[in-house]
Amino acid sequence: MNQKVLNINNLNFYYKKENPIYKDFSLELKKGELVTIFGKSGSGKTTLFELISGSLKPISGTIEKLNIAMIFQDPYNSFHPTYSILEQIKDIVGDIPQKELDEYLSKLTLQREILDKKTYELSGGQLQRCSILRALLMKPDLLLVDEPTSALDNIIAYDVMKLLITLLDKCAILLITHDLDMASWCSDKIIRLEENARK
């Protein structure tokens, strides 16, 4: 049986008590699974990631998880503007075997010299792929992925998702996306928050 990496049990959360975002919400995720959270803006998708990461605390219920890494929708807010990309990655993951780094750079179609640049020197697409690189090098049990391909063109977007799928023998992926076609293509399960989160 695959290892359980996330267990949410009877989660309740609200900003205003009369308008609960989550009511008795439960979710279990095992290594090897890719589950997509789908819903319109304001349905609680990003709030769920903040609860899982610990940035927000549940009103009640429990969230148990193993080691996590996150890929954010806006890569410009996930890197410091005054340090190189490589410096920031090494601050988190430490020394990186060159062979492993080269392998991921190739799969993400990134040039090695890009890592010596700062955020303002990169395009949104390049920076998002650097964000994905950082998350992969952290070797998480659970990868939280918030609109990972929003800054990428369609061909690169599907290549990136194919790369993430290859990691499922090592981790589980919880994905937020507005792209229902992509979700249907890659997911083991799709949770529609407007139908499920408040039940």
Image (cartoon, helix red, strand yellow):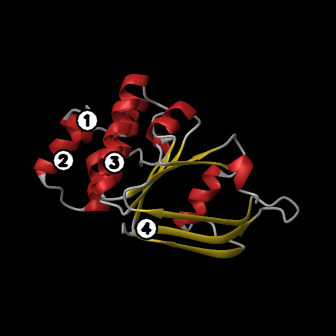
How far apart are the alpha carbons under marks 1 and 3? 13 Å
Q: Looking at the rendered structure, which numbered label has been put on residue 83?
A: 3
How far apart are the alpha carbons under marks 3 and 4? 33 Å
Q: Is residue 91 above or below residue 98?
A: below
Q: Few, some or many C-alpha atoms within 10 Å of disc 2 (few <14, some 14-19, many ≥20)?
A: few
- Quarter location, residue 178: top right
* Residue, disc 4: 5
How far apart are the alpha carbons under marks 4 and 2? 25 Å
* Residue, disc 2: 101
Earlier residue among tags 4 and 2: 4
Residue 10 located left or right of residue 20: left
Earlier residue among tags 1 and 4: 4
**Tag 3, which secondary structure?**
loop
- Quarter location, residue 13: bottom right
Q: Position of residue 124 (x, y in %)?
A: 43, 31
Tell me the residue at 49%/67% (across/down): 6
Tell me the residue at 47%/31% (across/down): 151
Three-letter code, disc 3: Tyr
Q: Looking at the rendered structure, which numbered label has been put on residue 114?
A: 1
